[in-house]
Image: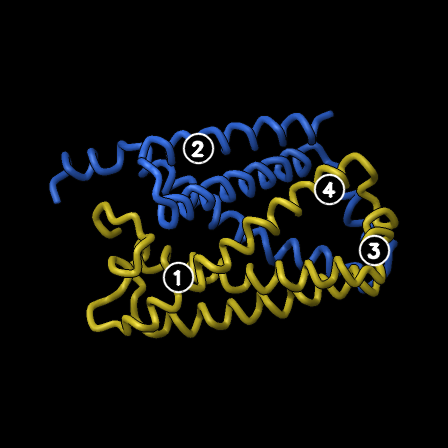
Chain colours: A blue, B yellow
Amino acid sequence: MSMKNDYRARNHPAWWAFLVHRLSGLALSLFLPFHFWALGQALQGEARLDTLLRWTQQPLVKFAEAGLVLLLAAHLAGGLRLLALEFLPWRGWQKSLLAWAAGAALAAGLAFALVL
Amino acid sequence: MSGAGLGYAPGPAAAPGANARFETWLWIAQRASAAVLALCVLVHLVTIIYAVHHGLSGAAILARTRGNVGALAFYTLYVLAIAVHAPIGLRALCQEWLGWRNSSLNWVIGALALALFVFGLRAGAAVFVG
């Protein structure tokens, strides 16, 4: 495949949707073991869970947490787009519009809900 | 990295001579788990927003989950869907971006699925008995 064709294949909304979906999925997969470990601390009692939660109050950790919530929302929107693409008999532009609308609504809604 | 393949169809991800039936089952499992996760993630996002506003302390979290059979059932289903979905997605990534296509990948991915399931259930049980 030539460089030109390679570039054309990737400079396309579907490629970016694919990339966001894959990278958000990878990041969420890497986060899961930490998430399960953190919740598992409850086995050692409420105080241990509190110690961990206090650690998460640091600005940088809170920022990372907000990023993870957005990645989860982005992966959800991308996944709904894929399910719509594969299982619903809609036209291409309708599916794209739906995905953009769902993604934008989720991002705006989450930002609003988490900050307020 | 494989050409411009978007990696969602079982075709491009399958190595020549690979078990087509196995790939098809993985494809179905990925979509079925995605459908379950769509609902679970929505509930999870709503829960996160609720928790942020109503206390994110150990006491507040455990007050919601301790002895809550409904929550335990929900998280068990959630963990099961994650243990199916995440490893299959990582498998596609390993195949397409790392060129890892031999059978050792399936064993590693299988072990990862089992580990996610066990540690996920442990996490759910921890906040249930908390």
Q: Chain of mark 3?
A: A
Q: CA distance from mark 4 to mark 1?
A: 31 Å
Q: CA distance from mark 4 to mark 2?
A: 35 Å
Circle 4 sits in a helix, a strand or a loop, which is it?
loop
Placement of the C terminus of chain A among the 4 image quadrants:
top right
Pick whichever of labels 4 and 2 is earlier in the sequence.
4
Report the residue marked by disc 2. Answer: A98
Q: Chain of mark 1?
A: B
Residue B14 position within the rendered picture, expressed as x and y whole percent measured from the top left? 27, 64
Q: Does label 2 lie on the same chain as label 3?
A: yes
Report the residue marked by disc 3. Answer: A48
Q: Residue at x 28, y 60 (%)?
A: B13
Pick whichever of labels 3 and 4 is earlier in the sequence.
3
Q: Which of the 4 image quadrants contains residue B76?
A: bottom right
Closer to the eye: label 3 or 1: 1
Report the residue marked by disc 4. Answer: A56
